[in-house]
Image (tube, coloured by chain):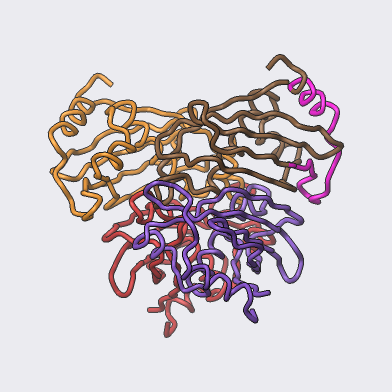
Chain colours: A purple, B brown, C orange, D red
Amino acid sequence: MSVYTTMRTVRFSHCDPAGIIYYPRYFDLIHEAKEDWFRYALKYPFAQMFGERRNGFPIAHVEADFTGPSRLGEDLTIALTIEKIGASALHLHYAVACAGEPRMEARTVIVHVELDTGRPVRIDDDLRERLERFRDGPG
Amino acid sequence: MSVYTTMRTVRFSHCDPAGIIYYPRYFDLIHEAKEDWFRYALKYPFAQMFGERRNGFPIAHVEADFTGPSRLGEDLTIALTIEKIGASALHLHYAVACAGEPRMEARTVIVHVELDTGRPVRIDDDLRERLERFRDGPG
Amino acid sequence: MSVYTTMRTVRFSHCDPAGIIYYPRYFDLIHEAKEDWFRYALKYPFAQMFGERRNGFPIAHVEADFTGPSRLGEDLTIALTIEKIGASALHLHYAVACAGEPRMEARTVIVHVELDTGRPVRIDDDLRERLERFRDGPG
Amino acid sequence: MSVYTTMRTVRFSHCDPAGIIYYPRYFDLIHEAKEDWFRYALKYPFAQMFGERRNGFPIAHVEADFTGPSRLGEDLTIALTIEKIGASALHLHYAVACAGEPRMEARTVIVHVELDTGRPVRIDDDLRERLERFRDGPG
């Protein structure tokens, strides 16, 4: 199973008065990991998806566990894997860690839609093939 | 069962290139609802919790379903209820709607900690009483 | 000269590890004040400007002075005034204070554009009249 | 004169319903550039400044010009230079561009303070020397 891994630093803007990440910012970080994955691994940048194709991938469901605080200046690894490729839904898993220590784990379900109607639309063959190739690849 | 209800407008800063709320901003909105609830319903503002008492309530778990897009300028109601008061954990439920139409529903588990050690600490009797009074109150 | 005044609470999400507002969040706050002013005072909501009219008001210039820290839970007043109504440019002034104590002051120049081309376009007579009526009004 | 240059991608979370950067996010980006500069060029990470030394560098003044829209997925370069090293104030300049095309230029004045009192405090000799070495360096 392939894993797409990227790194993010805990920024001043992410931290709360307790000096740790304010939890909604974790969702910004995993969203950025997904953007990079689409761009660099799937070769299908969000700018193209939104601009030319007029498709999007809004979220339908998320669940997350937070297992330890992340502090200003720490470098986090975010590991993204595909859990399931449905007709229009895509199930992704994220594991966020710092130097091997788990910090946050999330599962999301995102749904392929037409931007102009907001209606779910089947993941087309080209994108499906790229997703399957990633999922089944050597990593 | 008591419900604490507050309103929030979908702001320019919440919206993405599709003109709808970028989902991490929903967590900002329900966090603000919780801040208002602590301040106005429980009479225990976050500033006091963090500043004087040196306690916090970081998140341990969240799950959320997104049932419809929210657009720039819409006025959302956020309804907060208590699902469970544990030893140090507090289980909250949020229902976000626009003119009665459900948009997002979330369950969170937050844990009472000492800020300086990060260790879970029992919800003290004074706060526990306020939480129970809210939960059992007329709304 | 008319002043449009609105209030905003310093939120957990606005604060940095020093427990004070992280300065870019002030620009979120004054943007929200401008959104409210367009909606409630000028009766021309941003949702209508962007959606139906396909116009926008991107920023061309900003300058700001920060005169004191704002802390978690403080209630800030934001006072907006018009400094100049140009052909397509609008010069606004914002004064942010807490209980009369100045915290931040900003001047911005925003420019009326067509969204689809990004080109500056004259502020039309209807909007101009509303702006002038506000500027010259009793407050 | 030395220039510290870093790159940032325009993220989904930065963009507004017009598909361009919502301007307060530029200040997040230049703040991140400053954090990287302190960490990698000055070898004085913010985490150390805030945590061990209990010093900070809040903003006193900012002015910025926005010369062109930045769009989802674009890669921006941020070039930071020192304009002046005062007793406790530090004057920085930022130039943000995309493929050589200027997008935003900012000048900021930040002030060295003791975190616990908020009072301005002289930039100590060790930091001053690092700043001067950077300013006078080969770039």
Magenta stretch holds residue D138: no
Q: Can residue C23 be spotted in the picture?
A: yes
Residue B42 located left or right of residue C56: right
From what the image shows, is residue B72 above or below residue D54? above
Q: Can residue A12 be spotted in the picture?
A: no
Residue C80 located left or right of residue A58: left
Which of D101 and A57 lies nearest the eye of the viewer?
A: A57
Image quadrant occupied by the N terminus of chain B = top right
Query: In which quadrant of the rendered view does residue A95 lie?
Result: bottom right
Which of A58 and A120 lies nearest the eye of the viewer?
A: A120
From what the image shows, is residue A7 above or below residue A86? below
Please give the count of numbered marks on the rendered protein.
0
Which of C105 and B19 lies nearest the eye of the viewer?
A: B19
The residue most toward the bottom is D138
Image quadrant occupied by the C terminus of chain B = top right
Residue A133 location (% of width, % of height)? 57, 76
Residue drawn where x is 68% and y is 50% of the image: A63
Residue D115 location (% of width, % of height)? 61, 51
Residue drawn where x is 53% and y is 74% of the image: A41
Magenta stretch holds residue B110: yes
Residue C76 location (% of width, % of height)? 48, 32
Query: In which quadrant of the rendered view does residue A6 lie?
Result: bottom right
From what the image shows, is residue A132 above or below residue C118? below
Magenta-highlighted residues: B109-134
The residue most toward the top is B138
